[in-house]
């Protein structure tokens, strides 16, 4: 996040605020714990019925086989309504590789798909399309040791949950879908995020209890989004570089769009007009700092001036008068609000129209965290600031609907900064990723925000709807 020269706010911001989308998509309906009705897998597909060359009875192979069987069922049912043609099964098959126990004799002619040697898939998974130069194109292959480490961790470290191998299969199967219907545009980031979208559409189908072998719990959806942190491009990668896959926000946003809106949205919304938050660093200073402004500038300038500017413009568009609330830090123990004990790290007190944040327990550690930074802090404080704005509009500031709206409004603020020339600040590479990390890792803590039974997945989803559709998505009458 960087400061920008003070100049008149571009007219384009108003369109972004009131719903001229920066990113392709539509307003989202909150998912109330949607998940399949059972707690775990509903049985396994027999290996003989769904062969994977090189597979063992390893847990990752079992998960991958179940996912691939369910993916075939899903896309068999979706292809005609989505693409107007029948789905054809992959002709090149599926390949499992463990680089630490590699036996080339397990593979026909010592090859996996598309004539590759097994070591081509080390620390990876990929789909390769059909080609005249090799007999086993149209195939998916994966490194099961790598996927196991992602799912279950290594060396005592935690992984990202049992659904991660299934997610990777769903992404690669998304490329198999593209191999049948064509790419949305010949640009890597569009191709990769469309595959994420297809994976999200399938995951929603699983969450609704439709799959024969797979299931997912509500909390596991948080782990799925956390897993995308490992799968994003390095911060500072240009959106249109040759192998770009997308930022954390870009990939999570694509997945959630598929989850919310289904495969038709994935088909339609990933052409050359799609915008992405991923960008390259624009200066040596930006690169050296990772795009982060100093903490003091963040809380003393960007918080009051940046949020104040946004809400002044928003209220102008709504035909209302806006009075910036006071913004005050505290250290460890929040001041009382009209005699009430408010033991939260982020809060808005209607009695004195003051936004407060805990520097000791939240914003300083958040700024210093590996996946934190200036924009994580700004996103955090933007939530109680949005409650202050709701209060001035005569809207409730307590309960799930108010918190959901406030998180959405923090996304609408991000939409305005992304989509226009602001006079106070501009987005740096990785800033929107920091928002996702804050919402997943901190905002679900009842010490940070009121415990209103929203998962990290839900919080990110409503934030995304604000980024995509601006104020119109956020339940303030815009």
Image (cartoon, rainbow, N blue to C red):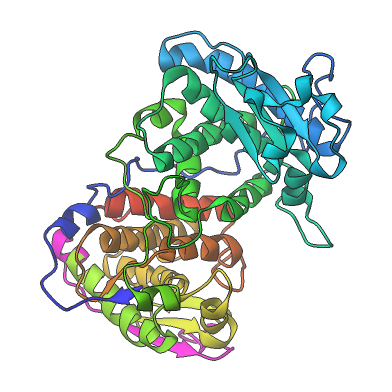
Q: Is residue 339 magenta?
A: yes
Q: Nearer the viewer, residue 115 or 160?
A: 115
Which residue shows up at 71% across the image and 32% down it? 117
Q: Where is residue 367 in the image (x, y as percent from the top left)?
A: 51, 79
Residue shown at 41% from the left, 22% from the top: 182
Q: Which of 347/43 is in front?
A: 43
Q: Can residue 35 be seen in this view?
A: no
- Residue 277 inside the magenta-drawn segment: no
Quadrant location of residue 212? top right
Residue 421 as seen in the image, left or right of residue 403 = left
Going by the image, does 170 lie left or right of 256? right
Residue 448 pos. (x, y %): 56, 72
Where 288 sits versus 153, above or below? below
Q: Exactly how many numbered labels are in the figure? A: 0
Q: 284 or 401: which is nearer to us?
A: 284
x 35%, y 79%: residue: 303
Residue at 70% of width from left, 28% of height from top? Answer: 67
- Tell me the quarter of the picture where residue 289 sits: bottom left
Q: Residue 262: x percent and y percent?
A: 47, 29
Looking at the picture, does residue 323 appear above or below residue 399? Answer: below
Q: Whole-percent x and y of residue 163?
A: 70, 41
Task: Name the image quarter holding the N terminus.
Answer: bottom left
Q: Main secondary structure of the magenta part?
A: loop
Is residue 474 shown left or right of residue 53? Answer: left
Front residue of 194/468: it is 194
Q: Magenta part of the protein: which range?
A: 314-340
Can the viewer see residue 104? yes
């Amino acid at each position: 996040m960087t400061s920008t020269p003070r100049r008149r706010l571009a007219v384009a911001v108003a369109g972004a605020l009131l719903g001229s989308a920066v990113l392709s998509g539509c307003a989202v309906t909150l998912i109330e714990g949607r998940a399949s009705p059972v707690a775990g897998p509903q049985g396994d597909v027999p290996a003989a019925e769904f062969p994977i060359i090189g597979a063992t009875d390893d847990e990752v192979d079992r998960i991958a086989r179940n996912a691939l069987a369910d993916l075939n069922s899903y896309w068999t049912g979706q292809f005609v309504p989505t693409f107007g043609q029948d789905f054809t099964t992959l002709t090149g098959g599926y390949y499992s590789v463990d680089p630490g126990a590699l036996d080339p004799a397990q593979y026909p002619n010592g090859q996996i798909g598309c004539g590759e040697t097994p070591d081509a898939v080390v620390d990876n998974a990929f789909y390769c399309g059909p080609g005249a130069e090799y007999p086993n194109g149209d195939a998916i292959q994966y490194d099961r040791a790598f996927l196991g480490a992602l799912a279950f961790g290594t060396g005592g470290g935690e992984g990202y949950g049992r659904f991660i191998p299934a997610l990777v299969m769903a992404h690669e199967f998304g490329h198999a879908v593209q191999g049948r219907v064509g790419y949305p545009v010949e640009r890597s980031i569009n191709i990769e995020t469309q595959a994420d979208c297809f994976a999200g559409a399938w995951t929603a189908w699983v969450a609704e209890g439709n799959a024969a072998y797979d299931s997912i719990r509500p909390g596991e959806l948080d782990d799925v989004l956390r897993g995308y942190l490992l799968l994003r491009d390095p911060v500072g990668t240009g959106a249109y570089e040759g192998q770009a896959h997308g930022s954390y926000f870009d990939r999570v946003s694509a997945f959630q769009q598929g989850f919310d809106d289904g495969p038709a949205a994935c088909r339609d919304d990933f052409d050359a007009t799609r915008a992405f938050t991923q960008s390259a660093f624009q200066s040596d200073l930006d690169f050296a700092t990772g795009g982060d402004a100093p903490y003091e500038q963040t809380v003393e300038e960007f918080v009051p001036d940046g949020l104040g500017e946004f809400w002044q413009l928003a209220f102008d568009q709504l035909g209302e008068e806006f009075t910036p609330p006071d913004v005050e830090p505290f250290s460890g123990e929040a001041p009382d609000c009209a005699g009430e004990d408010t033991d939260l790290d982020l809060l808005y007190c209607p009695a004195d129209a003051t936004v407060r944040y805990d520097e000791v327990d939240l914003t300083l550690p958040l700024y210093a965290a590996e996946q934190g930074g200036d924009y994580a802090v700004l996103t955090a404080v933007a939530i109680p600031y949005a409650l202050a704005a709701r209060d001035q509009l005569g809207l409730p500031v307590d309960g799930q609907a108010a918190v959901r709206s406030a998180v959405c409004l923090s996304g609408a603020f991000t939409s305005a900064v992304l989509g226009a020339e602001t006079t106070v600040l501009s987005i740096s590479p990785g800033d929107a990723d920091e928002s996702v990390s804050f919402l997943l890792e901190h905002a679900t803590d009842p010490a940070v925000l009121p415990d209103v039974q929203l998962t990290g997945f839900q919080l990110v989803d409503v934030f995304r709807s604000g980024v995509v559709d601006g104020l119109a998505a956020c339940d303030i009458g815009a």
